[in-house]
Amino acid sequence: MKLESLAPSVRQDKTGRVYYSAILGLALLLRSLIVIPALKGAPRWWFFNQASEYGCLAQSLLAGHGYSSPFCGSTGPSAFLAPGYPLLVAAVFHLFGAYSLHAAAALIGLQILFGVMVVLAVMLIAKRLLGSASANIVGALCAISPPAVCLPILFWETSLSMLLLTGVILLAMRCVERRDNLPWVVFGAYCALAMFVNPSLLLTFAAVLIWMTWQSGTSRMRGPALALLTWCVIFSIWPIRNAYRLHAFIPLRTNLGYELWQGNRPGSDGTFTAALHPNTSDEEYARYAELGETGYMREKSDLAIAAIKADKPRFLKLSAERFIKFWVNSVESKSSSLLSLNIAFTSLMGAVGLGLLFWRKNSAAWLLALPFVVLPAPYYLTHADFRFRLLLDPLAILLTTYVYRELRGWLGSHAARAKATASLDEDGFVVRT
């Protein structure tokens, strides 16, 4: 089937020029410039200390100890993090030296590349749904978006996860508009590989696959079946490895109970407390080493569930606060107020844009809404960090541009009607000028 345009009331210009080179060049320039002030002083340790688990896992792999010891030391096999990004870090460490300045520069360079590719992906989505002129606007806004510009200097998989989430929307559009089965196989493989990077994308990707199946109709069930089969076969490597190495059924990661404990333990304000993380707390690390990863995570899960059951109104209150924090104020107070303003504004415009799409019963409404509905749900229960909201930034900017196009079209129509009314004389006859 063919997806509808998001703005049928506004003239589409799909044959107009899209300035890919200029916009992608601007995105590359801004992301490269932000690195200069960020890496002054002690660049290596400032960068690598943001999430030392990645470095520890990478070192373990390079030392021949397998995927283990996420908090360094020697604590045995791990499934605390998905292996995709640590494997990338290990490759960079192998080429440029562990924790070296060149390794930091290479990882930041890769994340800058991921950021530029995000801009390209959202421009392609915008061109398909809004036309060439809007693709330029969306691309330019994504290129200069303050959160996205700053993202490459964070030592997390967030840059790559943003690319994977944006890319799945583009791939889903291609699948439902083609009659052959190959794009569906590619979609399944794409989802499986993305899960190796960030298993938190599972629910969103599954929801997108359901939407694709619904759009394709019952007469085209072979494609969705192939996608699901490819996805399961490829990703099954991870839970099989976990069952063999950790002697437990761990389909995604072991850390869900720990994250739930962080946000809901007695005394918690609903946010993540870095001082209670095993990579910073000697006490927590000792407990982790004593119980092993599965035992430690099981203990934290039990403590979290007990705290929630003991005070359910408090849990609901913290979840409501996390909901607000995710959409309005996910940036910590010490960060730039410009980032907070950007998050709040694009969240509001995204909600307005989705409301307009559903009001118009547009076929692409659910495709764009699903990431906003599904992706944040686990974070309402655990904790809402700034980088989680960043994954939705490109799509929020797309919807912001859609609202702008609709508003401009409405104002233009209103002005035209006013002009036509003004051209009639008092008897209702057209006045010629």
Image (spheres, grey):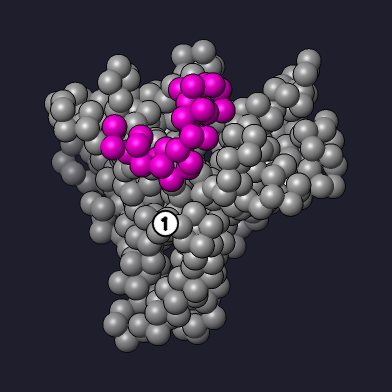
* Residue located at (70% from left, 34% from top): 31
Q: Please name the residue shown 43% across and 45% down the image.
A: 294
Residue 276 in the image: x percent, y percent? 46, 22
Q: Residue at x 27, y 45 (%)?
A: 355
55 sits to left or right of 125: right
Tell me: residue 400, above or below residue 245: above
Region rendered in magenta: 276-303
In this view, the residue in front, 149 or 142, is 149
The answer to whether 381 appears left or right of 31 in the picture is left
Q: Nearer the viewer, residue 399 or 167?
A: 167
Query: Alpha-carbon neighbours of circle 1 within 10 Å: few (<14), some, or many (≥20)?
Result: some
**Residue closest to the eye, 238 or 89:** 238
Can residue 408 be seen in the rendering of this structure?
A: no
- Magenta stretch encompasses residue 291: yes
Helix, strand or loop: magenta stretch: helix
Q: Which residue is mark 1?
A: 248
Q: Secondary structure at mark 1?
A: loop
What percent of the width, then of the height, locates residue 21? 73, 49
Q: Position of residue 230 (x, y in %)?
A: 49, 75
